[in-house]
Amino acid sequence: MKNNLNKNNIERYSRQIILKNVGVIGQKKILNTKVLIVGVGGLGCPIADYLSRAGVGTIGIADFDKVNLSNIHRQNLYNSKDIGKFKVDVVKKKIKSINPFTKIKTYKKKITKKNLNKIIKSFDIIADGSDNFKTKFLLNKYSIKYKKILIAGAISKFDGHVFTFDFKNSKTPCLRCFYQSEPSDEILNCEAEGIMGPLAGIIGNIQANEILKKILKIGKDLNKNILILNLLTLNFRKVIFKKKNNCTCKEH
């Protein structure tokens, strides 16, 4: 069943609808898109926040963690009163208070091959907000299998990366094409490596923006590129990468 704009929604999204690249038709596309966010931490929180404000009709959130005190400096949907609560429960409540029209599906579980194979099918776009490479490569694998759009982010210290993979295009390289081997999770370990709080918001919001661009089919996305940001130098750069001949994504 498609979502339609009503008078309240037109006012809610009016500053967005007025953009010539959006309009009423574009807003309806946003309303009828389903986005799955895996991991609602530093990246997943701003993605969920801004996609709900933009009017994405259905948002799935998958995370099995509870909020702890060290999360609060970079995970913008949580506060001190949320400590000890499951993240998906808190995010659902916060998103509903921001936009009651957004449908929220929660998955309070660790992502595995078995459950991801079932969950991913009903979503149009996958947003990777995870903090470990095992999950990132699982999302990569099943996004290829079901020809999904995958918007992936990674953050550590002062550095952030954003990837856009449109697996509807058979020429799109995948995450394994970029990494020669599976990196150590220590790279993404905020407890060991540390992280500057605003970096999470910046990278998460770039991911949200990439998702909206893909929904609306506007602008130039990051497909076949990686965006790299360093907060200390404020240097943004894009690096092109191609499919590896021996990569498993060649089989799809």
Image: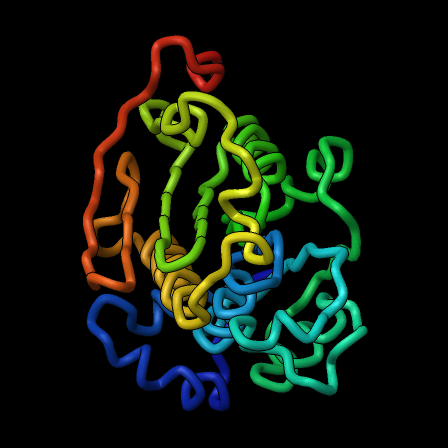
Q: Residue at x 43, y 15 (%)?
A: 247
Nearest the viewer among 15 and 247 is 247
Image location of residue 178, percent across then percent down:
37, 28
Residue 67: quarter of image = bottom right
Q: Residue at x 54, y 34 (%)?
A: 184
Give the left or right position of residue 121, taking residue 136 as reference: right
Vertically, is 103 above or below 128?
Answer: below
Q: Residue furthest top?
A: 246
Nearest the viewer among 120 and 30 is 120
Which quadrant, please, contains the N terminus?
bottom right
Nearest the viewer among 28 and 212 is 212
The scheme the figure's colours follow is rainbow
Image location of residue 75, percent across then percent down:
56, 71
Give the left or right position of residue 128, taking residue 135 as reference: left
Vertically, is 124 above or below 133?
Answer: below
Vertically, is 73 above or below 114?
Answer: below
Q: Is residue 221 visible?
A: yes
Vertically, is 192 above or below 169?
Answer: below
Image location of residue 242, percent across then percent down:
27, 24
Give the left or right position of residue 32, taking residue 81 as reference: left
Q: Residue at x 43, y 31 (%)?
A: 175
- The total of numbered circles placed on residues is 0
Q: Residue at x 35, y 85 (%)?
A: 14
Image location of residue 36, percent across then percent down:
59, 53
Residue 170: quarter of image = top left
Q: Is residue 29 visible?
A: no
Nearest the viewer among 234 and 33 is 234
